[in-house]
């Protein structure tokens, strides 16, 4: 049977030979030749292992003295890594810190701004007629999110409403999707009114890979007297952000996907400097101001930075790999990572389109416009569950998201152009050979 593909593997391999990021693959221990699940869990790198091993050695050799005498003293480790991360989200160092888990950070930040939403400092925004500046104060108690969010976001938001005696069914307003894949800006705008205090959206939808315009959504929120918060778990490390320039109010993300810091690695958060000094909804001793932290006063005094939203002691063994991962990412350059990511996802989408044109029931559910696409591609198929199982048996590590999505992530630091071609070839082969028919549909999330 002749190949259905409009691009030859030799052409893809030639692009690998010219790829300035190709050598980074040698610094990863990739568990499969075609590991395409870095949007769920990135593989370990030599760099991440190096900094983890260093902290383990410091623990062994210095014990408690590691807090003050580590190569990067543990006492200020969260702030140090926050400073390292700040350029990747376009923020000032004091606006970023590593802390907690993503879900805990959503609880903490949503709770904080529900408590303080009527008391936040006035924000100067350009009036619609561009003649005068008008101070806007958020005052509503409705949170606008969307029906395609990762579920944990809704769990946390609803719980924070319940803690405040508010009915989540009345106060969580969900923007509906027109196609089950994406959320349109116009529909978000239609959901905004004077009752809205917070617009909380993802930077990238976890299922389809749609990338949102953070600046436009932030401006929309502010123009409607609301705050703008984002869950950036599916973009940090793959897509450069400019949170401060966009005047984003707050954001959260994880570090085990594109940042490759390991399973359950520490999360990160951003809080615009205008809110430094607010009392977090979930205060803990590690967010107390550093100068008086060990005075052990029973009255909490928040740190005058994003560090106030730390809760417990920094978990060094889940934070240390992030340091090495950032060393590697600094060397690669986020702009080069993003450029290659767009090329890889373009290539994958083209090859899937070729399969569709040849009569295979594959389609792409991710926006074609690179400005609206994150780091993975949602390949749709009526039997996606069983196809994904067959792919994994063949060493193509992908994941399935109900009802019909195979998520494929060609992460630029360890995936090449020929790899993408080989994945497409396996998509074809699974169907041609009926390999998926040997599996039972699970209807679960792998």
Image: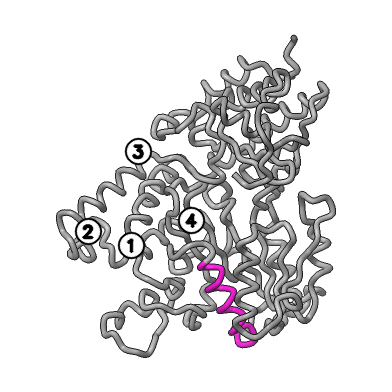
Label 1: which secondary element: helix
- In the rendered structure, are the residues bearing label 3 and label 2 in contact, judged by CB atoms less than 8 Å apart? no
Neighbours of disc 1 within 10 Å: few (<14), some (14-19), many (20+): many
The earlier-in-sequence mark between 1 and 2 is: 2
| Callout 4 touching callout 1 (CB < 8 Å) | no
Residue 219 is left or right of residue 103, and the answer is: right
Residue under numbered circle 1: 77
Which structural element holds mark 4? helix
Identify the image quadrant of the C terminus. Answer: top right
SS class of the residue under badge 3?
helix
Report the span colored magenta.
Answer: 104-119
Q: Nearer the viewer, mark 4 or mark 1?
A: 1
Q: Which residue of the protein is positioned furthest toward the top in this rendering?
A: 1
Q: Residue at x 80, y 77 (%)?
A: 193
Which tag, 3 or 1, sits closer to the chain's start? 3
Q: Which residue is mark 4?
A: 87
- Is residue 63 left or right of 299 when viewed as pictured? left
Q: Nearer the viewer, mark 4 or mark 2?
A: 2
Q: Are marks 1 and 2 in contact (CB under 8 Å)?
A: yes
**Quadrant of the frame with the N terminus:** top right
Q: Earlier in the sequence, mark 3 or mark 2?
A: 3
Residue 408 at what x, y percent from top left? 63, 37
Residue 395: x, y in percent? 54, 27
Quadrant of the rendered image containing residue 123: bottom right
Is residue 348 placed above or below 285 in the rendered structure?
A: above
Look at mark 2 in the image and give the residue it sits on. 70
């Amino acid at each position: 049977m002749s190949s259905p593909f409009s691009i030859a593997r030799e052409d893809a391999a030639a692009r690998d030979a010219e790829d300035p990021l190709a050598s980074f693959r040698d610094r990863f221990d990739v568990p499969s030749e075609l590991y395409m699940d870095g949007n769920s869990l990135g593989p370990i790198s030599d760099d991440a292992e190096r900094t983890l091993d260093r902290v383990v050695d410091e623990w062994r050799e210095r014990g408690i003295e590691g807090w003050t005498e580590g190569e990067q003293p543990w006492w200020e480790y969260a702030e140090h890594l926050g400073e390292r991360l700040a350029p990747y989200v376009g923020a000032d160092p004091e606006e970023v810190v590593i802390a907690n888990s993503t879900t805990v950070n959503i609880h903490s930040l949503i709770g904080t701004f529900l408590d303080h939403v009527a008391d936040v400092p006035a924000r100067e925004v350009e009036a619609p007629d561009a003649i005068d500046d008008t101070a806007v104060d958020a005052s509503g108690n409705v949170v606008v999110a969307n029906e395609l969010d990762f579920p944990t976001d809704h769990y946390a938001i609803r719980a924070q409403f319940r803690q405040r005696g508010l009915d989540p069914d009345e106060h969580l307003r969900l923007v509906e999707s027109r196609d089950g894949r994406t959320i349109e800006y116009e529909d978000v705008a239609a959901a905004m009114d004077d009752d809205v205090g917070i617009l909380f959206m993802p930077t990238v939808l976890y299922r389809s890979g749609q990338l949102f315009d953070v600046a436009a959504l932030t401006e929309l929120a502010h123009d409607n007297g609301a705050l703008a918060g984002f869950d950036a778990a599916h973009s940090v490390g793959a897509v450069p952000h400019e949170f401060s320039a966009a005047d984003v109010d707050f954001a959260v993300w994880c570090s085990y996907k594109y940042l490759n810091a390991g399973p359950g690695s520490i999360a990160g958060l951003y809080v615009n400097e205008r809110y430094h000094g607010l009392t977090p909804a979930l205060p803990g001793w590690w967010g107390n101001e550093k100068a008086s932290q060990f005075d052990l006063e029973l009255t909490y005094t928040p740190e005058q930075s994003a560090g106030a939203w730390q809760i417990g002691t920094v978990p060094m063994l889940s934070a240390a790999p992030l340091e090495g991962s950032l060393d590697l990412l600094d060397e690669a350059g986020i702009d080069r990572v993003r450029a290659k990511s767009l090329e890889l996802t373009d290539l994958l989408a083209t090859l899937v389109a070729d399969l569709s044109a040849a009569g295979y029931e594959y389609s792409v559910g991710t926006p074609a416009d690179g400005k609206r696409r994150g780091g993975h591609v949602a390949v749709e198929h009526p039997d996606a569950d069983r196809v994904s199982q067959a792919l994994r048996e063949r060493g193509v590590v992908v994941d399935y998201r109900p009802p019909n999505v195979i998520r494929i992530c060609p992460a630029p630091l360890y995936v090449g152009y020929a790899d993408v071609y080989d994945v497409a070839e396996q998509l074809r082969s699974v169907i041609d050979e009926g390999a998926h028919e040997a599996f039972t549909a699970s209807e679960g999330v792998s």
